[in-house]
Image (tube, rainbow, N blue to C red):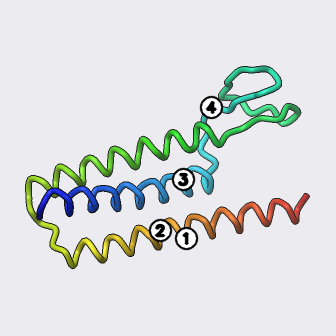
Amino acid sequence: MNRKTTYHFSLFIGLIAFSIAYCTIKHFLIPLPRYYPTLNQWSMIKDPDIPSMGWYAQTLVSLCIGSVCGAIAYLIGSLRRLVSERVLVIVGWMAVAAAGLMMLYLFQREWQGWIAS
C-alpha cells in the first residue's frame, strides 16, 4: 500500500470512529463538560434551569477518538501493508455509510425532541 492509500484508509477509519463515538455519547448520555454562555463557564453538572451547550465537548471527545483510531490505522497500514485498493474502497463506503447513519440518527433524535416540546 502506498502512502496515499494509507492516508485515505486512516481518514476513513477516523471518520467511522468519529461517527460511532458521537452517536454513542449522544445515545448513552455520557456526562461531559457543558458550557454555560450566560455564566461564561464550564461545568460537569447539568443545570436544567440555565441554558447550556454540550456540543463542544461532545465534538472534541469524538474528534480525539477518531484521531486516535485514524492514527492507529495509519500505523497499521504503514507497517503491515495489509490494505489493498479493494479494501480501501469498501472501507471508504463504510465511512460514508457511518457518517450518513450518524446524521440520520441525530436528525431522528432531534426531531423527537422537537415533537415532545
Q: Nearer the viewer, residue 4 or 92?
A: 4
Q: Residue at x 64, y 48 (%)?
A: 29
Q: Which residue is mark 1?
A: 101
**Secondary structure beneath label 1:** helix
Q: Is residue 99 left or right of residue 109?
A: left
Task: Name the residue type under label 4.
Answer: Pro
Q: Which residue is mark 2?
A: 98
Using the numbered discs, state the Cα–Cα distance from disc 3 to disc 4 in whole angstroms.
15 Å
Task: Name the residue type under label 1.
Answer: Leu
Q: First in sequence: mark 3 or mark 1?
A: 3
Q: First in sequence: mark 2 or mark 4?
A: 4
Q: Which residue is mark 4?
A: 33
Q: First in sequence: mark 1 or mark 4?
A: 4
**Secondary structure beneath label 3:** helix
Front of the two marks 2 and 4: 2
- Quadrant location of residue 85? bottom left
Q: Is residue 74 left or right of residue 90?
A: left
Q: Tell me if residue 86 comes above or below residue 48 in the rendering.
A: below
Instruction: Give the quadrant of the C terminus.
Output: bottom right
Using the numbered discs, state the Cα–Cα distance from disc 3 to disc 1 in whole angstroms.
11 Å
**Secondary structure beneath label 2:** helix
| Tags 3 and 1 touching, CB below 8 Å | no
Q: First in sequence: mark 3 or mark 4?
A: 3
Residue 66 in percent (x, y) is at 40, 49
The numbered disc on residue 22 is 3
